[in-house]
């Protein structure tokens, strides 16, 4: 296999190495060329190459370990692919977008790539330390990314909020990790799971776990750690919002999977001590997250904020995985993450494209969009209905798998999480209300202007990609679901 | 030979309905001739069938044939015909009178223009219903035609429910009368339907042949049959306008007079009586049912007659009279059936005697039904002729018309004499037979004695109000509208009058020439047989009636009634105002207000119909929908409230995070405690 | 590949092509959209008729199945099938879509989208009635919502936004509850076979053997979803609003076919898979049915809007279907299905007539109307036929949905010793006659109204006449020849009663 | 040997002080410094645990944390400068950086 030939012992690291190279040379490229289009093209090429390499490795079924800290398996591959898709979409539209910075173009792409590198690093880690470092790499890059927006003081404010809340959550995380480390004497997740040093529930364990949940819960914007998200998504430029909502959030979820699923997977000694408690904890967080996300989304008038809350709700849905803790649930959760990338990403792309075209961010600005740009309106309609879970779109299929997992235990039907499934579907119905508001504005209400809208071509390309995947994953979920199942099996072994 | 084609009898009018309905506008007289031809053809076929059947070998066994239609579960529902004596009689007089009335319509409906198409289509459909009902071979089939007739009755009562020549008020009146007719009869129909459920449940079939088989009846649950037949009788009460559902019929006079004549006097309202006669084998299973039937009949006869006493609307008088006469028929069937039922319960020789006596009630009821069809059709057509000519229905505006309308006045006089029971006129024979059987049943229970008494009083009232009507119309000084009289009606109208008057006078004699055998009822161990009974003959009936002292009583009462009417309304030597305080007496008002039945109906329908509906609607809008809207408002409001917590101040965010951590930690421990891990 | 195996996919694909074709017929071309829609729905109807003719003896020849999603834990197939239960519904769908296209041929506001929505709806409805896989079933079930949502909110009345979103969310919640039931079935299947096989046939084998508690619970979940769709009191309030605001075409499809999805689901899924659950909930089903019947009928009386009245009458009639199903007997179910079919034809007529009233006269408020029969005789005739059929006049199709059905119910309650319950049925029949006759008196008869300007009111146009006439003929045809429909239903019910 | 609890309590106190500061101080710089306090609280825990378990990982973690903290503060200060440039304030209160809400 050519990856091994080229990268040798570092084969497992191959996609990351490509990304790192990209991140490192991009400022130089920009410094040398001073042409942001070139920088953009280079970033894009590296992203695509990395994605291709990863895809090849994934399809090929490559597994391997590098330096004893980074393990590439199906799970890693799938998550990497997800992050790379996000990166690809974000980079693709960044050059054309009128929101992104024009001053520090090299740094901008380097940060995007660097943040992705962090995510990718996380996905292959099995040690709390490496996970922590990877997450911080992503976080710190994102703080900077948020502020890198042209002519908008909201970005600055968003950056401040993000960095403060992020810093707090880092502190919580590290404090939690220290507790766990103190109890078990190790930071290797598998070792912690198998550790016999803990002989029962105690306050230290509780605080340690809750602090970690809180710290990483910040990344996925789980309630009550979600409050930064709407502000940041609103303040940041659309490509960055896209990146955060679909990429950074997925990394948080991946961290949850890698830490808590592995810690409490059936049979581990920790699960015997407080497995069920953690499940309930997550179930409650999930219920609150989806409910608050959806209910508050109704009150929003800014479409970016609405999408932010909708992202919170979607994260809540995926947290069902953490409550149920089966590999089927994990597979469906991962699948939902994929579909979420395309539908939420697509929605942010349209918002970004329309901002480029001079439209506002208010939902009322979308009035009459169907007349002004049938394509964008139709695409938005698809994304929103997909988010609401209307068949036969991707969002429905993934929700079908995800919600169905709530009813399944290890051996068939279980009624333990039926209430969670009910909350999920009720939320799903509530979400229809605010998505339909946008649809109504686009299709039914008459706008003041009937002028046709022109958007940059790359946006069109990116949106088309999302549309295609939203439909294809809806009618042919197996394209990815098979990999998700393999990945889930690989992680939970 | 003809009998196999019995299905043609209702089918021909059906075809006429379709032809007239679809193409009638383009034919001469807007389809009138087609309708007449259809009715006439039906009559001819009926006559041929009747002749063949009555002279055939099968007689008196019913001739029936059916095809499978569909199945309700395991129960086969069939379509077919069922011919016996009763069928023949009904078929004949229905199609005959219909033919005459259709011809009459050519004249009467002449001015209606394009609407005539609708008229002829609807009456053809009606005839389908009536004849179909008569030849049906099972209750379900009968019920279908029963309802079709109801529909036609509705449509025809409402014939002028829009764009009435007399203006908007008349339109509204017709519309509301049609509605009332449909709904009131529907109430009965719903009962009938329930009765059919019970019968179907007991017999697993609705074919007459199955239901009238004594072996099957013996197998069935007798309580259920009782209940079923009471419910079936509910249908009769609705259709034949019996107390307490009689009130629709007077209102139904809002339709054209031809319709009143055909549907609301001669044929459709007889369907109820026919149903009792047809269902006789089941009705007589329980004496109590028959007692109930008799009571309803007697009470109706009396009540309706009282209301006719002081009405000024020529058609409404006739309508009340119709109701009253229908009561007679039901009374006869009830009284006879009561005796038969008692006899069957009793058994032995005494029982056989009772049965033999009771079957006369069947004959009397059917006989009166036929006679009534003739004379009431005649009377209505005469009144139609009068109305056609003077343009009003109010008798106070008529008077002295005898000079202007000779034929009409004479034919109507004949009809009135007939219904009043003037000796040797048709009504005399049948009415006295009815009274006779009621009196006979009175031997068994005091109820029937009371009913007989009511019936006798009714006979007196009948004579009085009929001649009150005749005198007010044709005698005395000329009323306001008499001046505008166009003279005698056209030939198409008077010819049927003359023909019918002949029948009205003479049809009573039919019973002396074998009709009693044709509509007799016999009970044997293995079957209930309609028709084929022993025919009494002329001598028997003359002897029977004229040796009966009560006959003379009724004759005297009838003459008395005519006399009083003469004094009051022709000679005007007696002022009717003296007896009713000039319309101020309580009784007069009660009668004028039809015993307050319309008010009662209104009250019931408003209270239990609209009142409840209002309540339901309130619950629907406020409670159920209110909950739904409230929930959604709560969600939206909750969203607003929670979003206000998002203050934009990063301190609050961090505070919430820290609070969240504390709460979650506590929660985690609590869960652990609940689950017993700690 | 035989021609039979193409039929069912064709029934989905043809309208789909129609939908896509009309979608791109904007601008000048939109006036041809109705022809395209007409042709495609016409072909669909022809294929349907061929299928009814060719498959009468053996429906299984049409069954097709393709693997759709086939992972280690889930098996979902693109399975289509047809049988005596669904064939009538498919016929209704094909027929009413065509008639609606014909009836609405005057629609000129964004005509192409209008027809796209109609065709898309046909796709969904066909899918629901043909699906032989729960996933597919659910997908199609939801697919029907979207076109209806847009039909109401684009082409509807003044409160259309409210009505559309209420319809959308209300029925969506219900179907999601149903979805949970489907999940439970899937996991139960997982426990038995090791994979979640959502195929109808697999489920029909496994489910009747499951524990009573499971059946009771899952039956309830599914039943709730179907009940809201039917809709039954107290979850019916979306219907009157939706109907009042929907354009005529939407109402016709909504009442004519979409409501049947609910009862179809109950029979197809609840009864076939959960006989014990059905037995457990039997009285609840009957109670809901009876309440819907009486409540709907009473509510009709209080309405002043013609369409709203007819909407409530749909609730009442579907309540009757529910009662029939609740009997769990041969007769009850047979005629419940027949009633579904009959109501499909009749309510289509009713809504066409009522919709036309609104169009032509400008209002549907009964207090404002009166004496229309004089000015619009043909319209009046159709209205009368529709009303009479709906109130169960013998000789028209409605009667055969009522009389035998109530008889089936009578048999059941007689066996249970609660015969007095029959009173509710009789009361409903009475009230039904009451509100229809009352409505006719108010609108068609009496003095011509002076409250609105009738100067420019015309009788129905040719296309509208054709649509109504076809329905009227069918209403009469099935009225005198109920066996035409019963012969499809009977074999299916025989099978179903075997399961119960 | 000093009991482990003492270190933990010290850490907890530091953590609490930091948390209090984060939640109340209106100056963004001070908030950043409070976050540093919290991180150091964790560091103390790590060092202590690392010492009590004979394990090098605790100290490694501390090094990593310090690095991360440095990076975070660097970026944080840059962001604050940017915010000051844009808004002329670094106050986190009502009249400061609270334009995005609800």
Image (cartoon, helix red, strand yellow):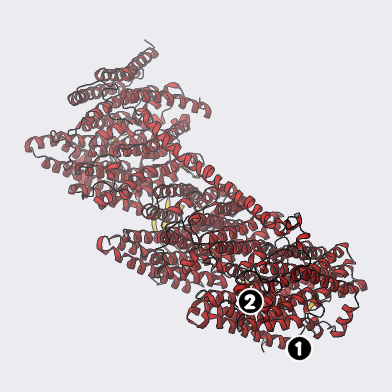
Q: Is residue A317 visible?
A: yes
Determine which of the numbered discs, if any, sits on residue B436 in the image: none
Is label 2 in a helix, a strand or a loop?
A: helix
Q: Quadrant of the N terminus of chain C?
A: bottom left
- For marks 1 and 2 on the same chain, the one whose residue lies earlier in the sequence: 1
Is label 1 in a helix, a strand or a loop?
A: loop
Residue B248, quarter of the rendered image: bottom right
Left or right of C5? Residue C204 is right
Label 2: chain letter: B
What residue is shown with label 1?
Answer: B57
Residue occupying the far top of the picture: D1
Q: Is residue C131 visible?
A: no
Viewer-proximal residue, D70 or B514? Answer: B514
Residue B59, quarter of the rendered image: bottom right
Q: Are marks 1 and 2 in contact (CB under 8 Å)?
A: no
Residue C418, quarter of the rendered image: bottom right
**Disc 1 with disc 2 on a shared chain:** yes
Nearest-to-viewer mark from 1 and 2: 2
Q: Residues within 10 Å of mark 1 (few under 14, many from 20)?
A: few
Residue A114 sits above or below residue B167 on the image: above
- Image location (x, y in percent) of residue A185: 37, 23
Label 1: chain letter: B
What residue is shown with label 2?
Answer: B385
- Image location (x, y in percent) of residue A108: 17, 35
- Image location (x, y in percent) of residue C174: 48, 48
- Image location (x, y in percent) of residue A142: 24, 32
Q: Quadrant of the C terminus of chain C?
A: bottom right
Viewer-proximal residue, A117 or C318? Answer: C318
Viewer-proximal residue, B349 or A83? Answer: B349
How far is the residue under mark 1 from the one under mark 2? Answer: 45 Å
Left or right of B247? Residue C451 is left
Residue A106 sits above or below residue A474 on the image: above
């Amino acid at each position: 296999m050519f990856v091994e030939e080229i990268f040798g012992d570092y084969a497992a690291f191959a996609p990351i190495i490509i990304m790192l190279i990209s991140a490192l040379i991009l400022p130089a490229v920009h410094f040398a060329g001073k042409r942001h289009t070139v920088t953009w093209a280079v970033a894009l090429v590296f992203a695509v190459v990395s994605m291709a390499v990863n895809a090849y490795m994934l399809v090929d079924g490559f597994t391997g370990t590098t330096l004893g800290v980074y393990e590439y398996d199906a799970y890693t591959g799938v998550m990497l692919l997800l992050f790379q898709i996000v990166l690809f979409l974000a980079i693709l539209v960044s050059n054309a977008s009128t929101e992104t910075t024009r001053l520090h173009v090299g740094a901008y792409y380097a940060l995007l790539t660097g943040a992705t590198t962090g995510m990718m690093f996380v996905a292959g880690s099995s040690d709390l330390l490496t996970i922590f470092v990877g997450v911080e790499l992503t976080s710190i890059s994102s703080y900077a990314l948020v502020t890198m927006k042209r002519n908008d003081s909201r970005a600055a404010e968003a950056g401040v909020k993000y960095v403060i809340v992020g810093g707090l959550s880092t502190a919580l995380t590290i404090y939690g990790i220290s507790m766990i480390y103190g109890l078990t004497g190790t930071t290797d997740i598998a070792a912690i799971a198998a550790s016999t040093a803990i002989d029962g529930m105690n306050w230290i364990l509780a605080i340690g776990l809750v602090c970690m949940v809180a710290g990483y819960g910040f990344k996925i914007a789980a309630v009550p750690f979600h409050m930064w998200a709407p502000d940041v998504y609103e303040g940041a430029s659309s490509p960055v919002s896209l990146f955060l909502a679909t990429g950074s959030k997925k990394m948080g979820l991946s961290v949850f999977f890698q830490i808590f699923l592995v810690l409490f997977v059936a049979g581990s000694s920790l699960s015997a001590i407080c497995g069920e408690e953690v499940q309930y904890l997550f179930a409650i967080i999930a219920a609150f997250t989806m409910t608050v996300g959806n209910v508050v989304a109704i009150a929003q008038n800014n479409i970016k904020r609405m999408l932010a809350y909708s992202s919170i709700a979607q994260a809540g849905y995926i947290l069902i995985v953490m409550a149920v803790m089966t590999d089927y649930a994990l597979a469906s959760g991962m699948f939902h993450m994929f579909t979420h990338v395309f539908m939420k990403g697509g929605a942010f792309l349209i918002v970004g494209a329309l901002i480029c075209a001079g439209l506002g961010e208010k939902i009322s600005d979308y009035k009459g969009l169907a007349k002004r740009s049938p394509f964008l309106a139709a695409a938005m309609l698809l994304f929103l209905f997909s988010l609401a879970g209307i068949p036969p779109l991707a969002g429905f299929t993934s929700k079908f798998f995800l919600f169905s997992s709530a009813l399944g235990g290890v051996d068939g039907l279980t009624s333990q999480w039926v209430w969670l499934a009910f909350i999920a579907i009720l939320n799903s119905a509530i979400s229809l209300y605010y998505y339909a508001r946008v649809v109504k504005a686009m299709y039914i209400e008459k706008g003041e202007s009937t002028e046709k809208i022109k958007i940059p071509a790359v946006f069109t390309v990116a949106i088309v990609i999302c549309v295609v995947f939203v439909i294809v994953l809806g009618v042919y979920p197996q394209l990815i679901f098979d990999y998700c199942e393999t990945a889930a099996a690989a992680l939970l072994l | 030979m003809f009998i196999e084609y019995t299905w043609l009898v209702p089918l021909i009018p059906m075809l006429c309905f379709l032809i007239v309905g679809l193409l009638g506008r383009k034919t001469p007289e807007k389809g009138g001739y087609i309708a007449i031809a259809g009715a006439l053809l039906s009559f001819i076929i009926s006559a041929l069938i009747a002749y063949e059947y009555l002279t055939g070998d099968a007689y008196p066994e019913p001739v029936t044939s059916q095809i499978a239609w569909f199945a309700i579960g395991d129960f086969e529902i069939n379509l077919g015909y069922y011919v016996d004596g009763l069928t023949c009689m009904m078929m004949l007089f229905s199609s005959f009178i219909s033919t005459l009335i259709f011809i009459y319509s050519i004249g009467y409906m002449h001015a209606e223009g394009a609407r005539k198409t609708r008229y002829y289509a609807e009456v053809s459909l009606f005839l389908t219903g009536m004849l179909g009902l008569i030849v049906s071979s099972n209750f379900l089939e009968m019920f279908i035609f029963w309802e079709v007739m109801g529909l036609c009755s509705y449509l025809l009562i409402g014939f002028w429910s829009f764009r009435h020549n007399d203006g908007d008020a008349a339109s509204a009146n017709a519309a509301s009368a049609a509605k009332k007719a449909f709904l009131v009869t529907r109430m009965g129909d719903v009962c009938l339907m329930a009765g059919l459920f019970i019968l179907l449940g007991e017999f697993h079939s609705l074919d007459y042949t199955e239901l009238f088989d004594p072996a099957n009846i013996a197998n069935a649950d007798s309580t259920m049959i009782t209940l079923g037949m009471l419910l079936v009788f509910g249908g009769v009460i609705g259709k034949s306008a019996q107390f307490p559902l009689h009130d629709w019929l007077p209102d139904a006079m809002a339709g054209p007079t031809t319709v009143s004549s055909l549907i609301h006097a001669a044929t459709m309202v007889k369907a109820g009586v026919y149903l009792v006669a047809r269902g006789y084998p089941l009705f007589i299973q329980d004496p109590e049912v028959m007692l109930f039937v008799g009571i309803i009949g007697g009470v109706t006869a009396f009540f309706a007659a009282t209301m006719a006493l002081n009405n000024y609307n020529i058609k409404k008088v006739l309508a009340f009279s119709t109701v009253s006469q229908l009561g007679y028929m039901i009374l006869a069937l009830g009284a006879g059936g009561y005796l038969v039922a008692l006899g069957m319960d009793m058994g032995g020789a005494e029982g056989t005697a009772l049965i033999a006596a009771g079957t006369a009630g069947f004959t009397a009821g059917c006989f009166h039904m036929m006679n009534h069809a003739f004379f009431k059709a005649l009377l209505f057509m005469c009144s139609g002729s009068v109305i056609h000519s003077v343009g009003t229905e109010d008798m106070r505006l008529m008077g002295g018309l005898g000079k202007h309308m000779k034929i009409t006045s004479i034919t109507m006089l004949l009809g009135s004499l007939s219904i009043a029971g003037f000796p040797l006129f048709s009504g005399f024979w049948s009415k006295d037979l009815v009274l006779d059987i009621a009196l006979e049943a009175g031997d068994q229970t005091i109820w029937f004695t009371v009913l007989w008494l009511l019936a006798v009083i009714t006979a007196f009232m009948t004579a009085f109000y009929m001649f009150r009507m005749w005198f007010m119309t044709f005698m005395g000084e000329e009323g306001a509208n008499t001046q505008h009289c166009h003279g005698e009606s056209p030939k198409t109208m008077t010819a049927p009058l003359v023909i019918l008057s002949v029948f009205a006078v003479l049809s009573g004699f039919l019973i002396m020439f074998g009709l009693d055998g044709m509509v007799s009822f016999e009970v044997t161990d293995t079957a209930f047989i309609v028709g084929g009974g022993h025919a009494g003959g002329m001598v028997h009936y003359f002897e029977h009636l004229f040796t009966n002292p009560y006959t003379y009583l009724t004759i005297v009462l009838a003459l008395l009634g005519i006399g009083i009417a003469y004094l009051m309304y022709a000679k005007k030597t007696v002022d009717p105002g003296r007896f009713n305080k000039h319309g101020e007496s309580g009784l007069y008002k009660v009668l004028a207000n039809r015993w307050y039945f319309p008010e009662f109906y209104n009250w019931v329908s408003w209270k239990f119909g609209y009142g409840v509906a209002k309540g339901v609607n309130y619950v629907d809008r406020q409670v159920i929908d209110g909950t739904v809207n409230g929930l959604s408002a709560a969600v939206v409001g909750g969203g607003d409230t929670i979003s206000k917590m998002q203050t934009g101040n990063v301190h609050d965010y961090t505070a919430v995070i820290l609070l969240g951590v504390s709460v979650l930690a506590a929660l985690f421990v609590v869960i652990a405690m609940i689950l017993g891990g700690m | 590949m035989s021609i039979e195996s193409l039929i069912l996919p064709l029934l989905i694909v043809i309208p789909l092509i129609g939908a896509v074709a009309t979608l791109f017929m904007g601008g000048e071309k939109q006036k041809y959209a109705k022809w395209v829609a007409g042709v495609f729905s016409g072909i669909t109807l022809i294929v349907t008729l061929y299928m009814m003719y060719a498959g009468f003896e053996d429906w299984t020849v049409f069954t097709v199945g393709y693997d759709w999603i086939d992972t280690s834990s889930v098996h979902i197939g693109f399975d289509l099938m047809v049988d005596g239960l669904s064939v009538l519904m498919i016929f209704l769908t094909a027929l009413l879509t065509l008639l609606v296209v014909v009836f609405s041929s005057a629609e000129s506001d964004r005509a192409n989208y209008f027809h796209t929505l109609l065709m898309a709806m046909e796709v969904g409805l066909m899918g629901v009635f043909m699906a032989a896989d729960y996933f597919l079933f659910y997908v199609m079930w939801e697919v029907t919502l979207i076109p209806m949502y847009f039909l109401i909110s684009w082409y509807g009345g003044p409160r259309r936004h409210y009505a559309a979103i209420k319809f959308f969310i209300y029925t969506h919640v219900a179907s999601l509850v149903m979805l949970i039931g489907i999940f439970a079935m899937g996991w139960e299947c997982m426990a038995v076979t090791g994979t979640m096989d959502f195929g109808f046939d697999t489920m029909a084998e496994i489910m009747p053997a499951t524990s009573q508690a499971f059946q009771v619970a899952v039956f309830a979940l599914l039943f709730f979803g179907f009940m809201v769709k039917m809709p039954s009191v107290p979850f019916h309030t979306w219907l009157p609003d939706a109907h009042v605001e929907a354009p005529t075409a939407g109402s016709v499809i909504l009442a004519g076919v979409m409501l049947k999805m609910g009862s179809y689901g109950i029979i197809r899924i609840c009864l076939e898979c959960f006989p014990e659950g059905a037995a457990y909930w039997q009285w609840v089903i009957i109670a809901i049915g009876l309440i819907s019947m009486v409540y709907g009928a009473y509510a009709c009386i209080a309405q002043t809007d013609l369409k709203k009245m007819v909407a409530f009458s749909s609730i009442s009639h579907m309540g009757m279907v529910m009662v029939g199903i609740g009997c769990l007997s041969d007769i009850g179910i047979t005629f419940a299905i027949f009633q579904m079919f009959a109501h499909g034809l009749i309510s289509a007529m009713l809504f066409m007539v009522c919709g036309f009233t609104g169009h032509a006269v400008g209002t549907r408020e009964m207090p404002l109307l009166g004496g229309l029969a004089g000015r619009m005789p043909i319209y009046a005739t159709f209205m009368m036929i529709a009303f009479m059929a709906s109130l169960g006049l013998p000789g028209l199709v409605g009667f055969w949905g009522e009389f035998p059905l109530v008889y089936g119910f009578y048999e059941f309650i007689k066996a249970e010793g609660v015969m007095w319950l029959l009173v509710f049925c009789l009361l409903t029949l009475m009230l039904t006659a009451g509100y229809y006759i009352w409505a006719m008196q108010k609108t068609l008869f009496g003095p011509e109204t002076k409250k609105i300007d009738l100067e420019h009111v015309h009788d129905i146009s040719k296309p509208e006449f054709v649509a109504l006439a076809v329905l009227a003929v069918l209403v009469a045809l099935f009225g005198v020849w109920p066996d035409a429909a019963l012969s499809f239903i009977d074999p299916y019910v025989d099978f179903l009663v075997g399961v119960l | 040997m000093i009991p482990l609890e003492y270190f933990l309590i010290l850490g907890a106190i530091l953590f609490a002080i930091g948390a209090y500061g984060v939640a109340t101080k209106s100056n963004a710089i001070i908030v950043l410094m409070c976050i540093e306090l919290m991180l150091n609280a964790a560091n103390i825990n790590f060092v202590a645990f690392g010492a009590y378990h004979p394990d090098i990982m605790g100290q490694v973690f501390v090094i990593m944390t310090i690095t991360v903290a440095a990076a975070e503060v660097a970026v944080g200060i840059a962001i604050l400068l940017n915010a000051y440039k844009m808004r002329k304030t670094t106050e986190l209160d009502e009249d400061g950086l609270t334009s995005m809400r609800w």
